[in-house]
Image (cartoon, helix red, strand yellow):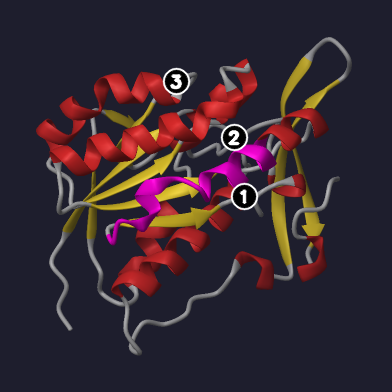
Amino acid sequence: MVYPTRKVLAVGDSITWGLGDPARESYRADLKNRLAHPGFPIEYVGSVQSGSSFHEGHPGWTINDIRQQVYGYLGEHQPDIVLIHLGTNDLLQGIDLATAHWRLNALLTQILAYSPDVDIFVMQVTGFLSADFQARADQYNNRMLTMSNLDHPNVHLVSQANVRGMQLWNTAHPNTFGYKQMGWNLYTAFRQVYGNSSWYPGTSPWQYGWADVCKQVWDGCRRYEREGSQWTLSPNQAGSEC
């Protein structure tokens, strides 16, 4: 089967931008590389560039920040697919946590009203090292399951909640390995929506025997940019704290 090139708009905050990944690729490069195997070409669009591609990932931005700009993004870039990972800064800043999923659902309504044919992959957020913030993320992710727009055939929920623990660079951002896990999770969702029996399942990062894990390190008052070390991996380490 020959697939047309689809324009993909990745929307979010510093996680979409790629903080924690030295190459600033976030999940974008891994997803694109995986989709190349079944011949499903994508072109990332947006006004921001980090790593090798464009996007609309804005460090520090909240759900409402994106809501204020989304019509401009859709009008300028005319995407076929929108990827959304949002809410981390709402959780960090404590912005009306009980209704964060309503704001996200309102963003989905805006996108569907402006671009009714677009496919949306909306992600549950990645984890935190802090137990308090992780509890907020768990609540937010669970509340996302009640969003009314999940009933729309073009809206697809993708869990990124398993990106946590040793897959984090600092308290809230994945490291390179975590971003690969995000790419794998998205590829799995794309395969379910667009794929057929010819699509190779791909290899989950958790099937690797080892990985170089990069983390931010504090000595109590000073921050060191990163500490690299090699970890031996096994499936039961998913979601563990280190």
Residue named by callout 1: 178
Quote the CA–CA distance across marks 3 and 1.
21 Å
Q: Give the amino acid type for the residue marked by disc 1 in the picture.
A: Gly
**Which residue: 55% across, 39% down?**
21
Determine which of the numbered discs, if any, sits on residue 20 in the image: 2
**Which residue: 65% across, 50% down?**
163
Residue named by callout 3: 61
Q: Which circle's residue, 1 or 2, is located before the other in the chain? A: 2
188 to 27, vertically: above or below = below
* Helix, strand or loop under label 2: loop
Q: Residues within 10 Å of mark 1 (few under 14, many from 20)?
A: many
Quadrant in the rendering for residue 143 = top right
Q: Which residues are magenta?
A: 137-153
Residue 232 x/y as whole percent: 81, 63
Q: Nearer the viewer, mark 2 or mark 3?
A: 3
Closer-to-camera residue (107/47): 107
Determine which of the numbered discs, if any, sits on residue 221 in the image: none
Quadrant in the rendering for residue 196 = bottom left
The reply to whether the magenta stretch includes residue 150 is yes
Q: Which circle's residue, 3 or 1, is located before the other in the chain? A: 3
Q: Which circle's residue, 2 or 3, is located before the other in the chain? A: 2
Q: Are marks 2 and 3 in contact (CB under 8 Å)?
A: no
